[in-house]
Amino acid sequence: MQKGKKFQCSGEMIRTFTIVALAIVFLLGGGSFPAQAGYPEKEITIIVPWAAGGGTDLIARFMADLMEKDLGKPVVVVNKPGGGGLVGFKQIAAAPPDGYTLGITTNSQILQKYSASSYQDWREMAPIALHNYDPSGFTVKAEAPWKNIKEALDWAKANPGKMRVANSGPGAIWHVAAALLGSKTGVQFTHVPYAGANPASVAVAGGHVEATSVSPAEVGTLVRGGKLRILAIAADKREPLFPDVPTLKESGIDFAFGVWRCLVGPKNTPKEVISKLEASAKKAVNDPRFKDFMTKNGFGQMYLGPAESAALMAQDEKDFEKIVPGLGLKKN
Amino acid sequence: MDSIAGLFYGLGIALQPQNIFFCFLGCFVGTLIGVLPGLGPGGALALLLPVTFALPPSTAIIMLSGIYYGAMYGGSTTSILINIPGEAASVVTCLDGYQMARKGRAGPALGMAAIASFIAGTISLFGLLFLAPPFANFALKFSSPEYVSLIFCGLILVSYLGAGSKLKAFMMGTLGLLLGTIGTDPIEGIERFSFGVPYLMDGVGLIPVIMGLFGISEILLNLEEAGFAGILTEKIKNLFPTQKDWKDSAWPIVRGTVLGFFVGVIPGGNTVISSTMSYALEKKISKHPEKFGTGVIEGVAGPESANNSGPSGSFIPLLSLGIPTNSTMALLLASLMIHGVSPGPFLISQNPEVFWSVIASMYIGNLMLLALNLPLLGLWIQVIKIPYAFFFPVIFLFCLLGSYSLGNTVFDIGVMIFFGIVGFLMKKYGYESAPLVLAFILGPMFEDHFRRSLVLSFGSFGIFFERPISAVFLVLAILLLLISIFPALKRRKERSA
């Protein structure tokens, strides 16, 4: 009897709770319907289309932490790896354009249009804040005979196909970088794909290939360890991490190319939401803690707003259209 | 700082209360996930990585590496008691460990597994301590041709493994190789067998496949056998091995330790390979190879030493070069990066506190693990003894969580369940999963390095013989092949005579 009564009692309590809870949900839900006025009102999710622990993920997590403090609502990073990023790109583009689902993309998304069987058009996304830029470098073994980029390219010209350039994967951004450099200078490289920038740079240090096109940041440890030497970087300005390394432009080669990372939302995200997010991202990128983190990990620093980011994306698309189909990557 | 001074400096940091606590936590969680089938150290590290964000770098790495080597200890318990490898590296421990248990010798098997693990873990740390600094230059000599020859050598060693039909093992190996071709081609970037499914563009995930073949299939098989519990219900006695056990195990432990350490050092080498190789080696040089698979203690001692010395070895290329040798090491690399420590030739001079305290903590951790695994064995057995009605849903839940957490995708859960059903059918019809999994891991690595070697050599096959390290492995592989064919030929001659 006692038990039965207890049960009834708790059943009633559950019912009461449910009604109260539902009422609260309705009130809040109803109240929040005219959106954006108080954006953000709930948790924001940032989709990282690559695995946890990679460069894109590390930067996204650091930025999310700073944005969370600024926006006053949780900013959560969720990794959705797969298909070289395609799984995540598709989810970002397909998310409701309410500012609560954002994502990170890089120029590899644009590259997939020319190198993969399917791709996600970047125009289905709304750029918010480009927060990192790493130029391609031309790095050789410390004991290599070439003193500067000119000597190396001259040797490569005299020995067609003998200069083996390691990249971070077939059709990956650094493969394209080396190919673009080759076509710009009329040099024929042999491209050697590795499973990432790390094995590629170690292959150069071990003397298994002549050079690599990965970024200065990615070869940083081995350069400081005296195993590798960067001959030049494909950037407009010298890299603060390696102020002694000249740019290709200084050597008379008009070529700048790099990988960037950009915070985006789905297309049609309201303007007010974008500008709120942009302001918060900009604040995060300019935070000394963020700058310190980027320097410590060797990530290149750059900031571009929505319009400038979109312009860069369009430019990359044009470049890729010219070069990638000729790379010999078989698109099926 | 020389190695001895470094060790004492490291002990000073590792013995701080906070670090001892997290070392213990890592070892405890490691043993637990080692004991629980389905969830391996990789999945557990991925799940716990975010927890370490707030910790100082040394503490974080101390805890995370504790999970890794702790899992190696725990993995043997389930292998011996219920014939399910707690994690992939303990696959071969099942072969003889479970048979020992069925003969009522579960105690010595468990005891020997823990003691062999401790000896191997402790001795191999000396290797790490003294070899890490000068190692960097040697590892740089390893390029694709060396990997090709090494994997070739490994595959030949693995071919000894199959306890049942060689033909069935060969079929499963081929299936594994085929499975490994799914995804983007590593050299030309062509998509193979992905049928436009983005999830398949990077290939089929290893961990869902392993969880399916080793975890789910086991659940299904046992469900079918209506209430049968493979768990040994009798009391486990005599944890301490007999004098004869010691005599039989001494050399396998030494060989397993050395082998495991060096396989761990080689990029791409992991504890699955080292324990498998150790088992094959012991079987090969044994005076009674036919007894392997029926419950001989060497078949437990060797592989268990090999998979416990592997992690120490793997730390060498990770710390001195920043090269993760396997997926678990890749997660440790990620956590180092999160904490602003960049591994490489300068890690030891730039972050001495991280390098030395992690090594020192591993001595402490191995002691803790011996304590966790021997006197507390009862606790882990209780964990396993939980009735299957409760146990299965929990394993299943862990598998679901683990496979989902890898990429936050339901697709991996689907892969896991699919391979669970495949594994169930395989077990029912007497096909082994080990050759499938090994071929699935090694096949893509072999292809990648083989084709890259030919790009590097501008198409010449001579590259495999011209390079000394590669040539040594190839000669070794050919010798192994001859040794294995010779007895068969001899037998045939005798028969015809």
Image: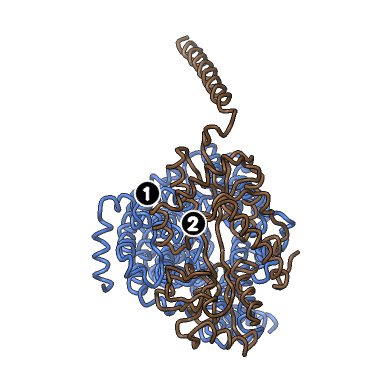
Chain colours: A brown, B blue
Q: Who is closer to the viewer here, A219 or B352?
A: A219
Q: Does the rendering let one see residue B309?
A: no
Residue on which disc 1 sits: B54
Residue sitting at 70 percent across and 60 percent down? A113
Q: Amino acid at mark 2?
A: Gly
The answer to whether A120 is drawn above or below residue A238 in the figure is above
Residue on which disc 2 sits: A53
Q: Position of residue A307 (x, y in %)?
A: 60, 52
Q: Position of residue A245 (x, y in %)?
A: 46, 76
The answer to the question of whether label 1 and label 2 lie on touching residues, with beta carbons closer than 8 A, is no
Q: Position of residue A308 (x, y in %)?
A: 58, 55
Q: Who is closer to the viewer here, B424 or A190?
A: A190
Chain at numbered mark 1: B
Q: Who is closer to the viewer here, A191 or A18?
A: A191
Q: Amino acid at mark 1?
A: Ala
Tell me the element at label 2: loop
Where, by quadrant of the figure, is residue B128 drawn? Answer: bottom left
Residue sitting at 68 percent across and 52 percent down? A123
Chain at numbered mark 2: A
